[in-house]
Amino acid sequence: MKYDYDLIAIGGGTAGLTATTAAVGFGLSAALIEKHRIGGDCTWTGCVPSKALIRAARAAHETRTAARFGILVEPPRVDMAAVRAHVRASIETIYQHETPDALGKQGVTVIPGTARFIDPRTIQVGERRLTARRFLITTGASPIIPAIAGLADVPYHTYETIFDLETLPASLAIVGAGSVGTELAQAYQRLGAQVTLIGETLLPKADADARAVLETVFAREGVLRIRASADRVSRDGDRIVVHAGAERVSADVLLIAVGRAPTVQGLDLEAAGVAYSADGITVDTYLRTNQRHIYAAGDCIGRAQYTHYAGWAAFRALQNAFLPVKVKTDAAQVPWTVFTDPEVAQVGMSEAAARAEYGDKVGVQLMPMDRTDRAITDGAIDGFIKVIHTGSARVVGAVVVAPRAGEVINEFALALDHEPNALNLAGTIHTYPTYSTAAQLAEAAIVTRWMLNGMIGRIVRWAARRGR
């Protein structure tokens, strides 16, 4: 059978972009179908605008607190229209490399429209019917709208609309204390809004010690916390009232940030015979659906919802779809970062998970930021580096709470993928003074303790004495 394309990717976010551009590099014909905007959530409503907003907020915070470094300045005045212009300029700069024209020059055919399956080998996009040797579903995810009484009767924002605010609200209530909620809570507080963050647990997936640091920082910066789930919202004139257990908060603007659900509706997956549920499209460890020629990657499969994982998984799916050597995927080792200040980053097993699996064999090495030279010079002593290891000095997980934690965690991610022994990490020269130096010191402490304990320790001490 002659197909229109070797690969058709449905969804133009990071996963679809990665797969189709790599496919043309393999010498394949590839089409990318997108019903809205190329770039997906990351470019338009997620990673890019949030980090641009966070940077603007950090500038305001640094100006406001510059006196601690001996720099005396007037309190900052936030021009929210200019902040929004900065956010939009960041988006446009990144998008210029993702436009249909830019992709077309690389050999990718961009087809605007909504795709739905006619049968396992055919999709309909507008008036066109298209076939492919392989399909890759990369439709992403969308905001979860929780079943909160009264929510349908009040105006609210999600991450898809919050960056369109033209004026800074005097007060902002955020329902949801996960990554989106925490990042935007601190950012808007620093810009000058009074933020109330509503959610039982701050960053539920994070290390408990990391949560404690962030709670302390948020309290110091003035973010108000309601440690309960929102169960009702109502109107009070122009203001919105959120009821959470016995607590009640009134705000000018409401942001709903309780998570994201895989986008699986509207594709007519039944016509293709593809299995899915509300949790996402069902795939095996090779990212293949129950239809051998149809793959799925990114947020739509309901695993780790991170841009970096989506791109990585999409490339693996492409390899598995067209190359003879198949590569398994594992979401358990995906590093992640929440871009608060300090940043919170983790990879591998948590301390609790490691203790559950290895019991007394687990060791934890902590390097506080107030013992880290670079953190001291930066005046950024909130946080720590925690390395979780077994008795044999094998690293099984890490937590970094510090400025640039998202950079430091990559060291541990690389180690876990290759040689997760603290001896290898500690033996690598690190530049000084950096936050990564603290990682090396933590790793060196693990190695030293391992070398000096038990039989190995006796041998080392004997050899040292003999070598004098």
Image (cartoon, rainbow, N blue to C red):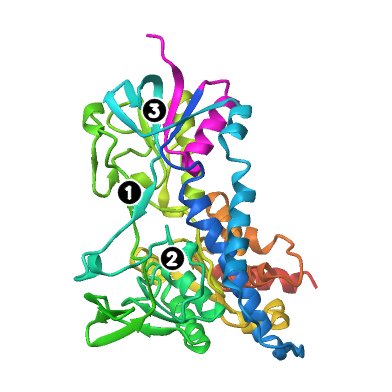
Q: Is residue 88 above or below residue 262?
A: below
Q: Which residue carries the number 3 mark?
A: 135
Residue sitting nearer the eye, 461 or 287: 287
> Is residue 68 visible in this depiction of the protein?
yes
For marks 1 and 3, give the CA distance: 18 Å
Left or right side of 244 for 421: right
Q: Quadrant of residue 215?
A: bottom left
Tell which circle, 1 or 2, labels the residue nearer the N-terminal end.
Answer: 2
- Using the rendered view, name the quadrant where residue 21 is placed: top right
Query: Is 112 inside the magenta-drawn segment?
Result: no
Disc 2 crowd rating (10 Å Cα; few below 14, some 14-19, many 20+) is many
Quadrant location of the C terminus? bottom right
The residue type indicated by label 1 comes to Pro
* x 57%, y 64%: residue: 84
Is residue 285 depicted above or below 89 in this figure? above
Q: Residues within 10 Å of mark 1 (few under 14, many from 20)?
A: many
Mark 1: secondary structure: strand
What residue is shown with label 2? 180
The image shows residue 59 at horizontal and vertical percentages of: 65, 75
Q: Which residue is the site of mark 1?
A: 262
Q: Earlier in the sequence, mark 1 or mark 3?
A: 3
